[in-house]
Image (spheres, helix red, strand yellow):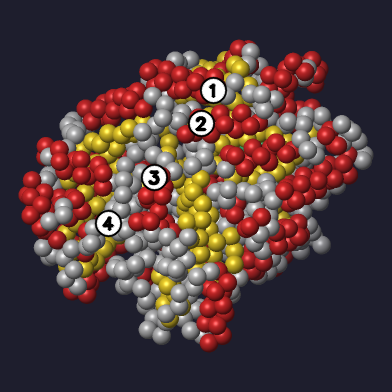
Amino acid sequence: MSLSREIYNELAAIVGSAHISDKPHILAGNRAKTPDYPMEYKSAEAIVRPGSVEELQAIVKLCNKYGIIFAPMVSGVMPTAFASRPNTIIIQLSRMNRIVEINEEDRYVVIEPGVRHVQLYPELRKRGFSYTAASVGPGGSVLANFTSTSGDHHTQHGNSRANRYLLGVEMILPDGEIIRTGSLQTGSGWFCPDGPGPGLRGIVKGYNGNHAQFGIITRIAIAIDPCKGPAEPEMSGISPHHTVRMNTPCSKVIIYKFKDIDHLRDAMIKTGEAEIGSTVIKYFYLPATLMMTDSANDFWKMWTDEHKAELTMPLIVHLATRSEEEMKYEETILHDIAAELGGVRIKREYEEWWENHMDFFMIVSRLQSVLRLGGGWAPIKLASDSVAHICEVGKNINNFIHDFTDTGKIFDAPEDYQIIPMEYGHFAHIELLIMWDRTDPNVMKGVGEFRAASRQTDIDNHFHAEMPVFLSPGSMQIGPLYSNFHIWLKQLKEAFDPNNVANPMM
Amino acid sequence: MYYPKSKAELQEIIRAAREKGTPLVPVSSGTPHIHGISANEKAETLDMSKMNKIMKISRDNRYARVEVGVTFGELIPEMKKNGLRLNAPFLPRANKSVITSALEREAVLVPKYQYDYTDPLLTMEVVFGTGDDFRTGSASGPGPYEELKADMVSPWGPGTVDYQRFIMGAQGTMGIVTWGTLKAELMPTKSKLFFVEAEELSVLTKFTNELLRYRTLDDCIILNSVNLAKAFSDTAEEEQDILKRAAPWTFICRICGFDRYPEKRIEIYESYFADICQKHGIEFKSAPFGNLELAAKIDSMLWDCDRRETYWKVKKGDVREILFLTPPSKVPYLTETLKNAVSAHPAEDVGITLQPQVQGRAFRIECDLFCKSSADVEELAFNAETGLLKNGAYFDRPYSNICQEVYSIDPVGTESLRKIKNIFDPDGIFNPGKLCF
Ligand SMILES: Cc1cc2nc3c(=O)[nH]c(=O)nc-3n(C[C@H](O)[C@H](O)[C@H](O)COP(=O)(O)OP(=O)(O)OC[C@H]3O[C@@H](n4cnc5c(N)ncnc54)[C@H](O)[C@@H]3O)c2cc1C
């Protein structure tokens, strides 16, 4: 079904004809473009680019009236930002890209959806502040990162995931009405997400975001914190041959490798108990290697057993302190912990790589190189619980992954999972990253089997290792295992979006 | 009055109440119920105090899971035995339920450990008005509670909705919580208390706002002389003595060290503290008005709850609290507004406490109007609340009459909350008339 001319004209009247298109080549260029899956994607019926909340509200009201599905988009990194079914328009929000307020005294910023990390991060850094930026890279929308995705990030050991930093939210419901959460609801400012009484913040985001299934978010406030270290890191070279350094004695990267996940776990817990370290992370060794190299040839040269041994069980620690004395204190504790647990310092050249790429701890400008090999990739598991439980989940991966890595169904990197503790080790997040050869016509069958095996192992072991996502046929299936959340989620969706127009997945 | 002892009994009571249309009002703490129990005369009380098991305390993973009837008086010593402390409110009464305190988003003593307003409550089990049970966050599954290997500490979800945020702050209108998991912190091996006294509150709030950015302080609280005297005295003479000698405002904070090099940590953090004091022209002391005995008493009381026969807030008979949140920048203005609004009440009966929350991003301001009966000061308090609301104070936990004012500001928001209520308590049996339902 294509949009009628009348509706198209009504949309054009809202945004102006320069900001709407249904030209086939424009629509074709805006199909979901992840190279991971050899799939055919649908085109939207039109793309509209509102410039204000009022225009956006009028578009949503119109969609609700005529039963047209809408999917909001900023950079379109996520496939959920595109048309997944007929009768869909894409609402491209990149014109709404104002940093509305930077409030240094009360430590928050208010932003529109189109604000990217590359826009916000430097603006804050030069004022001595930073925020919890995802590793999506500079082009990602900060708002989509905070509201639509997991919000986990590299530096959450010393702070937390984005959920904790999402403050006031202004959102257009699927019927076009605007809600404001927390203190905004009573006109008391942006600072508090919760209440009055029970809060509407609950429908904005749970463990992960709902990808506009309850409406379009127009402005959010996020909490900011002073950053330790110089406001401007030293940069040189041109990407991807660039370096970003913190030339100060108050910033240091120290990496220890451990015999196994049990020892790594204990080291994570002990650094958390001592409340030291700005970043503590067991990072994936495959993306780490991709980030360290510039081409497939370089990658294969580096991907040796000796290299893998260095990065299989690493505890990557970034110490950032306010004084040299504090640095000495934190370093001493870290070395003590490593010594107690048999940690071995890895080759200095690896530590140097991280020290030369401090963007890993900021807005991660290099991570897009994960895609560079041209392979398909997907994050699997994605859940959080105590460090101990999450490490148990990680340990168990070895019990089922070899059937897939040894047979070439997925890339042979069985330890390619990351664990990032947060709130000084009160919880940790896990992500298993798998890659595959997308030129192989049968590959998706193997990947599907792997996903199923991973999920089944966790269910059989009673591990909390894969948090269900948004309302979809998949979540209806696993809902009974997760407190029947699917029943409540469906009722909430029906109450707020009776016409099922807000980016439905079922 | 019902006293369920298990989830199954609770579900049965809810089913029967639903059939008969009997409203249920849950309580979990012992008396006094400062914000009143029931707004509905036909309601039956659902007393949860018999569900009072400490289910698990984990030193290694730093949490405690307890049933809703467990009180601060019971839990704090058990935590200590395990080398742990709760991020608890300031001197809660010993018979107060630990879980309902967190459900109410009561202010906690250590802002640096609080990452958002739901902290330190991590996960919970709740029975909705339909009789269905539900677990939040990583307690949600997969599978039944008894089989789940997770520690059930991750607060978010399940899935894309934060169900705990519908239940917290709901004053029992959305569902009845049976147990909750609370974040715990390690008991320090060494700690040091500091005091700053000030004539003007604005001096302290500005300095606190900078100080908390360092994330080096544990306990952190500001009290006016009335609340300092009421909270930390055991006799009327002692109270009068503190009241006479204390500065109008006292800031109290603590710096801690843990197992590894605790002295060094305290030394480094104290040097940061001293630098900031110097920058603001502030002198810090080891005791209020040189009273070392009082300092030692405060030090030990801050680790515990109020175990005295008469809870410190009701020494006079009753108390009417005015509670709101505000970002740091608005603290001086709103505190002045508050003081003016309650100036008709005798000054020696106006206690004010300010607690920086969520890493210092906001302050919870609490005004305690000490009185014989709260009914006597209701009009004064309500007028003060109305004025504060107009001036931007955020009543995130609206009690009594101010509720209506709060919920009338944004009809779309209020209607949206009602949609949620209709899902989780479709027959409206939980605490009807309490909030906007
Ligand atoms: C290599 C890579 C690494 C990543 N790492 C992380 C990570 O470490 N942590 C993490 O949390 N995420 C991560 N992500 C996900 C990433 O954060 C998000 O995909 C990104 O922030 C989205 O930005 P975008 O501009 O591309 O959003 P889009 O793809 O345009 O949108 C993302 C989703 O948000 C919805 N959306 C967009 N705007 C709105 C709005 N205003 N209201 C409601 N819904 C809206 C869209 O419909 C879509 O469903 C990663 C992604 C990639 C590709």
Marks 4 and 1 close (CB-CB < 8 Å): no
Does residue A385 lie above or below B176 as drawn?
A: above
For ligand 1, tell me if the residue under mark 4 lies within 8 Å. Answer: no
Q: Which residue is mark 3?
A: B80
Alpha carbon of mark 3 to alpha carbon of mark 1: how far? 26 Å
Amino acid type, label 2: Lys
Marks 1 and 2 close (CB-CB < 8 Å): yes
Q: What's the residue at 82%, 43% (across, down)?
A: A450
Looking at the picture, how far across and down is residue B128, in whole percent? Answer: 55, 70
For ligand 1, tell me if the residue under mark 1 lies within 8 Å. Answer: no
The numbered mark, 4 or 3, whose residue comes first in the sequence reads 3
Question: Secondary structure under badge 1?
Answer: helix
Q: Which residue is mark 2?
A: A270
Q: Which residue is mark 1?
A: A340
Alpha carbon of mark 3 to alpha carbon of mark 2: how far? 19 Å
Q: In the image, is B227 to the left or to the right of A271? A: left
